[in-house]
Image (cartoon, grey):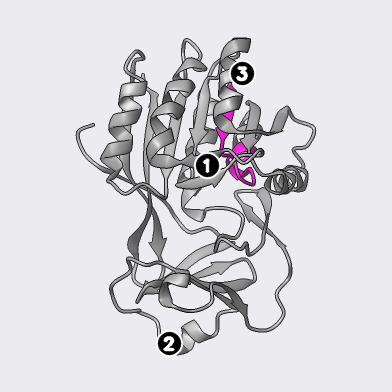
Amino acid sequence: MKQIKIFYSESWTDYELLDTGEGEKLEHFGSYTFVRPLEDAFWSKTLSQKEWDKANGKFWSSKVGAKAGWKMQGKIEEKWKMSCKNIKFFASPTPFRHLGFFPEQAVHWDFIEKKIKQSKKPVKFLNLFGYTGVASLFALRAGAEVTHIDASKQILNWAKENQKLSDLNKLPMRIIEDDVLKFLEREVKRGNKYDAIIMDPPKFGRGPKGEIWKLEVMLPKLLAQVQKVLSDKPLFVILTSYGIDSSSLTLGYALADMMKNFTGDVEAGELCVLEKSNNRLISLANTAVWSVLSK
């Protein structure tokens, strides 16, 4: 790694980051706008407070001393359809401030689809901590055989709904409820291998049987197991973190070490969204990507 990279994609029809400032962000999700916390937005808002007050809902963080959770203005659908480059999925406010997907990862969705389509061989794609499955659907549409893992049954049902909504339910995608490390241990024993892997481990979480996950402790163990399920000629590995208290270089060095026996490049940097109000990039996560060298 010679330099930090900025990973971002342009706004898409159903999602826009409208403005940020004073610890918050204002976003457009399909038919609705919402205010969510962005604790490190130390600057002033660009749009007027009147514009912010038009939002359909706001998520209050416990950090500001208010009762944590959503407060809505008017009637909000329980869930609604959204689309990114003709991949369709449902959005819905969750108790954890998210709406069922991470818009800043659209740049990774584009990368996944492009790399799989360019591959001259069948691709086995593994999505660890797969959430509601948008990345998996881009891989599936590109022609990959997909395995999608998450510890939450409710979230996996959401992923199945998204697959059906995108009319991709007849394509090969295994959706598995499991603790990621236990799943990987079994895959190692079975001898199963994967050509492309994406992982977005949480800072803290619990598995289906109450297994405790702490990122700082578990990330080295995760990478060690992932290394064992890589095929002889992997295509790419993507690692993203929203909860690690260090720079993207940390992820980059860890991923480079994991992939040291393969010929490829690691790019580490910040996962960003372009802000509409003043055309600047807002960093929302750290990420690192290993991929085969371009010919």
Which numbered tag is attached to residue 109? 1
Q: What residue is shown at x 52% (from left), y 17% (from top)?
A: 229
Helix, strand or loop at label 3? It is helix
Q: Determine the image quadrant of residue 139.
A: top right
State left or right for residue 128 relative to residue 86: left
Earlier in the chain: of badge 2 and badge 3, it is 2
Q: Position of residue 104 (x, y in %)?
A: 46, 53
Q: Position of residue 211 (x, y in %)?
A: 58, 38
Mark 2 Cα shell of 10 Å, populated few (<14), some (14-19), many (≥20): few
User: Closer to the camera, 168 or 175?
Assistant: 175
Mark 1 Cα shell of 10 Å, populated few (<14), some (14-19), many (≥20): many
- The magenta span reads 124-137
Q: Is residue 235 above or below residue 153?
A: above
Q: Determine the image quadrant of residue 129.
A: top right
Instruction: Identify the residue position indicated by label 2 in the image.
Output: 49
Circle nearer the viewer, 2 or 3: 3
Instruction: Identify the residue position indicated by label 3 in the image.
Output: 186
Q: Quadrant of the N terminus?
A: top left
